[in-house]
Amino acid sequence: MNSSPHLAELAAEWRHSQLLYSLYAALAREFVIELPPCGDLESGVEAPPRESIEQARQWFLDVDERIHVHQLRQFLQTTPLNTEEALRNLLIHHLHKKQHSEADRDKVDFLLVQYFSQCATAGLQDADVDFQYVAQVLEPVLGPVDAGIPEGLVLADQLIEEAGVCKDLNELFTSQVLEKGRKLKASRADDYFEPGAMVAFARFSFLMRRIFFRLMHQDLNGILDGLRELESRGVTSLDCRRAQFSGEEPVARLRMICQSWKVMFQAEYSSGQPIRMLADLRAVVETALTRSVSKISASTSRSRTAAAGVGGNSFPASEEEENATSPGLPSES
């Protein structure tokens, strides 16, 4: 009689394994990852023997080592298979492992934020994302979490406040808030997987991602507005070597790149090379705008001086001076 609950648990585990197998197979196809077949899971057997369940467990452990967190992130943010049930199954699968690696921690960290984002109330304000609310939303995967923020994780709140006052991505990167957050997660080691800690870090990562995306879109819009202004002033190219582009990058091409970044960066939350390029490009555009204003002011000043000189019977301007005050702006280089 005592075997019935155990059999029910095994049956539920097998159903979850079948759903996960379909998800993993789709991910493997997208990234061309060679995965060994798992016979009974692939054939759709409804009531497999205990040996098949053990083989499936080992199959998932082996395959997890071949799938990197960036692949899981990209896949789940583009596939229609990214459902609440799929995220819940992935989380339960990773959380129930007897031993957790750093890769497991990174995957769980990402999955918790994805699950919370999908299940949280629409139109949620930052102020509403407190510890208790996050714990409530994550309860289906973490269970009840009654305590508050664990001791030692108050720093996470301080980092959120520090990031919240940053004016752009460059300031966010300079503050090293993202790096400090990663170090804080790593410092917890196995304690990261305590329910209270996972709630605190899910809240931290969700709010940090919101701040990051706000600054990212602000930078992109600032670049596009700046490029339009520079074009209206006759500037056709910029020296973008600081942002890892060419020394004479056409403004029209930069505008196209920024439009493509708006799509590409939808799923990104990191301080990797492309995001650094975005932050550096905004600095290039702002510098070019300042220089352009200075040239216009200097040209206007010289023109007024020359006009006053003619009225006062001063010596005429030399050929070089006349060229310096000629109308129009050269391309930035």
Image: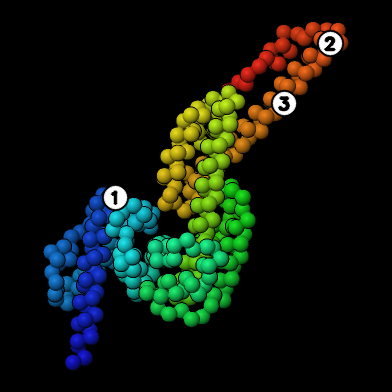
- Amino acid on which the number 1 mark rests in the picture: Phe
Q: Is residue 271 left or right of residue 329?
A: left
Q: In the rendering, at what x and y percent does residue 159 appear?
A: 59, 62
- Amino acid on which the number 2 mark rests in the picture: Gly
Residue tagged 3: 297
Q: In the rendering, at what x and y percent does residue 188 appear?
A: 50, 70
Label 3 or label 2, whichever comes before in sequence order: 3
Task: Give the number of the disc on residue 31.
Answer: 1
For discs 3 and 2, the disc positioned in front in the rendered view: 2
Compared to 256, does 305 lie above or below? Answer: above
The secondary element bearing badge 1 is classed as: loop
Label 1 or label 3, whichever comes before in sequence order: 1
Could you give the CA–CA distance between mark 1 and mark 2, rounded to whole angstroms? 74 Å
Q: Is residue 316 left or right of residue 209?
A: right
Q: Nearer the viewer, residue 231 or 198?
A: 231
Compared to 142, does 250 lie above or below? Answer: above
Q: Nearer the viewer, residue 317 or 284?
A: 317
- Amino acid on which the number 3 mark rests in the picture: Ser
Compared to 305, does 314 lie above or below? Answer: above
Residue tagged 2: 311
Most extreme residue toward the right, as rendered? 312
Q: Is residue 7 left or right of residue 81?
A: left
For discs 1 and 3, the disc positioned in front in the rendered view: 3
* Observer able to see residue 99: no
Task: Give the number of the disc on residue 218.
Answer: none
Q: In the rendering, at what x and y percent does residue 297 appear?
A: 72, 26
Q: Nearer the viewer, residue 185 or 321?
A: 321
